[in-house]
């Protein structure tokens, strides 16, 4: 399986144009970002493993742990990762629990419990339902997979802390919003909520978010 980046999503330019036309906040942020765009990786296992590594830590910290993990693995393939010792994974910076999750994920890919060729045929909620059966994969991680691997255009990870912080900063001068208010803002971004979410992330952290 290749981990090489794939190109800009085909819908990206249209999404940015429509978001900018409908929302002055989006127009300003899109202008600031310039040509930046979502960069996805075509390897399902890598996307999910990176999402597990990135749970509840900053983008910068996740990248550092991931870099050490890649070095230790040599080749990020399910068969290889499934055989890695938990102590090796811990030395890369993974918690004991995340080490267990990554190895369980690798095993499921290696034995065929997860079929990366079948996932693109499913709708968003069915993908989520299948992935959350894996240890360590909750709805947020499954949503990251939808955005960064399957390039689904209208995913809204409403429980993502970075997204919530960015919405509060740009739409309420930093004041906390109710869940209903967040959902209402998300509704105004349809059918491009994945793009709007990515723009919100980038407004807080100049390091591109990639899984």
Image: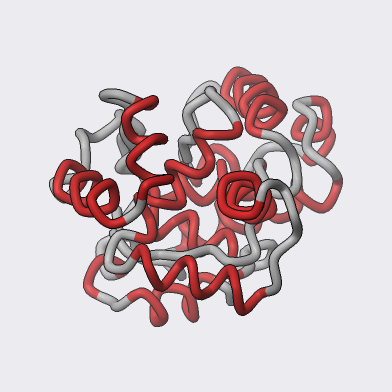
Residue 115, image quadrant:
bottom left
> Where does residue 60 sit, x and y in percent of width and height?
66, 25
Q: In front: 34, or 154?
A: 34
Residue 192, image quadrant:
bottom left
- Residue in the image at 28% along x and 76% along y: 122
The answer to whether one can see residue 82 in this image is no
The answer to whether one can see residue 91 in this image is yes
> Where does residue 203 sit, x and y in percent of width and height?
53, 34
Q: Is residue 145 left or right of residue 54?
A: left
**Image height of 23 relative to 33, above or below:** below
Q: Is residue 160 left or right of residue 146?
A: right
Q: In front: 148, or 53?
A: 148
Residue 125, image quadrant:
bottom left
The image quadrant where one finds the N terminus is: top left
Q: How many numbered circles are shown?
A: 0
**Image height of 46 relative to 133, above or below:** above
**Image height of 176 relative to 81, above or below:** below
> Where does residue 84 sit, x and y in percent of width and height?
68, 37
> Where does residue 139 sit, x and y in percent of width and height?
58, 70
**Image height of 95 relative to 71, above or below:** below
- Residue in the image at 47% along x and 74% along y: 128
Q: Is residue 202 left or right of residue 38?
A: right
- Residue in the image at 51% along x and 51% along y: 48
Q: In front: 69, or 108?
A: 69
What kind of colouring is applied to the model shown?
A: secondary structure
Q: In front: 53, or 196?
A: 196
- Residue in the image at 64% along x and 49% along y: 52
């Amino acid at each position: 399986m290749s981990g090489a980046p794939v190109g800009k999503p085909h819908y990206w330019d249209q999404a940015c144009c429509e978001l900018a036309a409908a929302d002055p906040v989006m127009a300003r942020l899109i202008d600031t970002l310039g040509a930046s765009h979502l960069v996805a990786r075509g390897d399902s296992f890598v996307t999910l493993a990176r999402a597990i590594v990135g749970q509840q830590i900053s983008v910068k910290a996740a990248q550092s742990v991931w870099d050490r993990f890649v070095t230790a693995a040599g080749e990020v393939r399910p068969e290889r990762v499934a055989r890695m010792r938990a102590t090796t994974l811990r030395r890369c910076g993974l918690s004991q629990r995340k080490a267990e999750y990554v190895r369980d994920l690798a095993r499921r890919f290696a034995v065929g419990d997860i079929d990366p060729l079948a996932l693109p045929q499913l709708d968003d909620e069915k993908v989520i339902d299948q992935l959350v059966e894996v240890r360590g994969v909750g709805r947020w991680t499954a949503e990251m997979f939808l955005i960064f691997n399957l390039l689904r255009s209208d995913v809204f990870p409403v429980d993502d802390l970075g997204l919530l912080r960015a919405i509060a900063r740009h739409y309420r001068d930093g004041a906390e919003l109710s869940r209903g208010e967040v959902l209402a803002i998300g509704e105004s971004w349809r059918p491009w909520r994945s793009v709007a979410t990515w723009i919100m992330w980038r407004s807080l952290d100049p390091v591109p978010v990639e899984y």
